[in-house]
Amino acid sequence: MIRKLPPLNALRAFEATARNGSLTRAALELSVTQGAVSRHVLQLEAWLGVPLCSRQRRGIETTEQGAALAAVLGTAFDQIEAQARRMRQKPMGNTLRIKLPPTYAIRWFVPRLARFHALNRHIDVQITTSHQTVDFDIEDIDVCIHAGSAPPAGAECRRLFGEVLLPVCSPGVFRKYPPIERPADLAGHVLLCSMHRPDDWPVWLDAAGIHDIDGNEGLKFENSALAYQAAVDELGIVMAQRAFVEDDLRTGRLVAPLALQVATSSAYYLAYPRSRQKAHVIEAFSEWIVQEAAAVDEIAR
């Protein structure tokens, strides 16, 4: 089948113009003259038979059809760029690039990483953290940890462990504030929460039958790891995920003043591209982390 594509140079010029909002900036990016970019855009408009952008005093504004085409082109060029970068790089057969949520990385993964390294010293582990869902087609990522109510679509996934919520605090809190014997006593304490997890306190309080306490009126932090540290530093009581404070509970650095634990519908999943599931670094990592995670679910039960 013969592909009937628009002129490729014209597509490239239009995508750069739409993304930069300027013929001049597009020309600088492409190392051509502004007139050349303008001619390419006009050529593409003539080929398609529709206007793609209009010239404004301060730059270029795309039409509705132009914006739709620019979005498609941007995704396509991103994928081409990522694949070309992967092909140009030296072989990295022993490198494992992992993307993790920040709190998962700080509170659960990194403390266990030495055990994986001891078993697999030949594997070079590279770690990045983000709350954003991975896109294996664009990002140079081998495996990710996904948090949510369902595993990410289009990838090979293994469930690691679920979420169990419970309030925890430093035992030193009770030198400043009265003890907690029932959920209603939380009204006399400072409540800590993550801005990324605004539902945690409401979910637990609802399960406890408490409807007159707003768990999100206390101190708010950018992520849960900061909120947990604030609890260790005796700033208040945090709604924690059990898996991320288990070591602190065992050592007594944190305590759980109330027995109620609430399981949510969310879980943590290991995900990786189906095309790479037989890669030896992914097989080794998958086997190890599934074994580590099994102990978490056992404690939760």
Image (tube, helix red, strand yellow):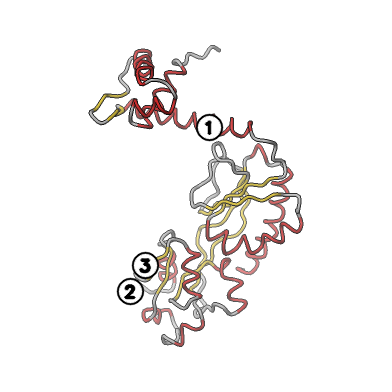
- Where is mark 3, residue-wise? 216
Q: CA distance from mark 2 to mark 3?
A: 12 Å
Q: Position of residue 47 (x, y in %)?
A: 38, 13
In the rendering, at what x and y percent does residue 294 appear?
67, 61
Quarter containing the C terminus: bottom right
Please state the horizontal and vertical placement of residue 121, each as a whole percent of the image: 75, 53
Cα distance between the residues tagged 3 and 1: 40 Å
Q: Nearer the viewer, residue 115 or 133?
A: 115
Q: Which residue occupies 57% across, 62% down?
A: 106
The kind of residue tagged 3 is Asn
How many neighbours does mark 3 have within 10 angstroms: few (below 14), some (14-19), or many (20 or more)? some
Snapshot quadrant of residue 57: top left
The mark closer to the camera, 2 or 1, is 1
Q: Quadrant of residue 160?
A: bottom right
Q: Residue 72, image x and y in percent?
A: 43, 29
Lower position in the chain sequence, tag 3 or tag 1? 1
Kind of residue at disc 1: Gln
Asked if disc 2 and disc 3 are in contact, CB closer than 8 Å, the reply is no
Identify the mark nearer the N-term, 2 or 1: 1
The Cα atoms of the two marked residues, 2 and 1, are separated by 50 Å
Q: Which residue is mark 2?
A: 212
Residue 287 as seen in the image, left or right of residue 130: right
Look at mark 1 in the image and give the residue it sits on: 79
The quarter holding residue 33 reads: top left
Q: Residues within 10 Å of mark 1 (few under 14, many from 20)?
A: some
